[in-house]
Image (cartoon, grey):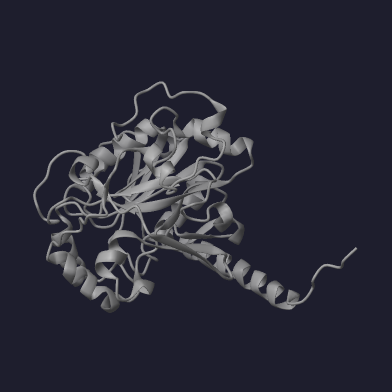
Amino acid sequence: MSRPDRRGWPRRLWSAYRLRWKRRELLWRAIRSGRALSPVRDRTAAIRKGDILAFVCLRNEAERLPEFLAHYRALGVGHFLVVDNDSDDGSDRLLAGQPDVSLWRTGASYRAARFGMDWLGALLFRHGHGHWCVTVDADELLVYPGHDTRDLAALTAHLDARGIRGMGALMLDLFPEGPLDRPAEGTVLQQLPFFDPGPYRCQVMQPRRNRWVQGGTRERVFFADRPQRAPTLNKLPLIRWHRSHVYVNSTHSMLPPRMNDLWDGPGDPRLSGVLLHSKFLPSIAARSAEELRRRQHFADPDAYAGYHHALTQAPVLWHEGALRYEGWRQMVDLGLMGQGDWMAEGGPKTRKPLPNIA
């Protein structure tokens, strides 16, 4: 019998020790950051055992919120826990009037709060333990195989039965055919019907084992000369939360490291989803001009000033290789999401109608 390879074990031990301390540091940081949150409407007493919860940090998302809330309600989210970062477009008033929303407000720095993850970390620690939690941005609509007939309760029951603690997803940029500032009406997919089917690439980053997926639309248009700067597209939006968990870099990576092994990016056949990303609605030019002033969305804002300036010019993102979004089966066929044995097992159907999102 061969002996286990013990070479390098001191380095592995030291790395594990450092990651444990990093996780504790981020948890304490999140708990402290919770003090910056002022409750506007705290309805968390209504949360029931087994409810699927959604956690969101946003600013000025009134144009997206009606469709966002309808989408996740239809998927089976029981309660929304939202941090409003000083909105002035009525987002806070809209949310405060929703009976299934608990709302907190803060005027503190989004960038200093690790792009809102410290605030959401405080709410996840306080309210998420033991629940399946969806952590997304207001411009992300989660879809997965069979989402039009089987809700999140069925999906999470499937994952629970297999001892799987979460599901990864690709953030898929959607865009229109014409200039980004051309007025449009309708749902997200009516306004932004196109996407890039690839190429996408994935690396495993040590020591956290987090995946790093890049490629797609924004790299093609804005970062072709420096692809290493292109946005990270992999996310872990659906997790059975434990109070020992913490997001490290947005929802792109987590601790403990084993959580990052849930998904290997496009081409992984395991059950996964796609986050339909509506960043490029007609308001993007004005939003980008504001971001050039606020400097809140990147650790090094100067390095991305050119990107935001390009968006203020409302470029055309469409090209001949773009595809029109046709639904989850198309995503599976393209390898952008996997289905594992999820669709093969039959399973319960969702009784209430789901959003008309193809």
Residue extending furthest left?
183
328 lies left or right of 65: right
Indicate the quadrant containing the N terminus: top left, top right, bottom left or bottom right.
Answer: bottom right
Q: Residue 131 in the image: x percent, y percent?
A: 52, 41
Residue extending furthest front?
320
Residue extending furthest right?
1
Q: Residue 107 in the image: x percent, y percent?
A: 27, 61
Total marks shown come to 0
Image point (35%, 72%), residue name: 227
Q: Residue 309 in the image: x percent, y percent?
A: 17, 71
Can you see residue 249? Answer: no
> Which residue occupies the foreground of this view, 200 or 147?
200
Residue 223 sits in which quadrant? bottom left
Image point (33%, 59%), residue name: 216
Residue 13 sits in which quadrant? bottom right
Rendered position, 190 above or below 217: above
315 lies left or right of 125: left
> Which residue occupies the foreground of this view, 38 or 328?
328
Image point (44%, 40%), residue name: 53
Can you see residue 105? Answer: yes
> Which residue occupies the foreground of this view, 27 or 335?
335
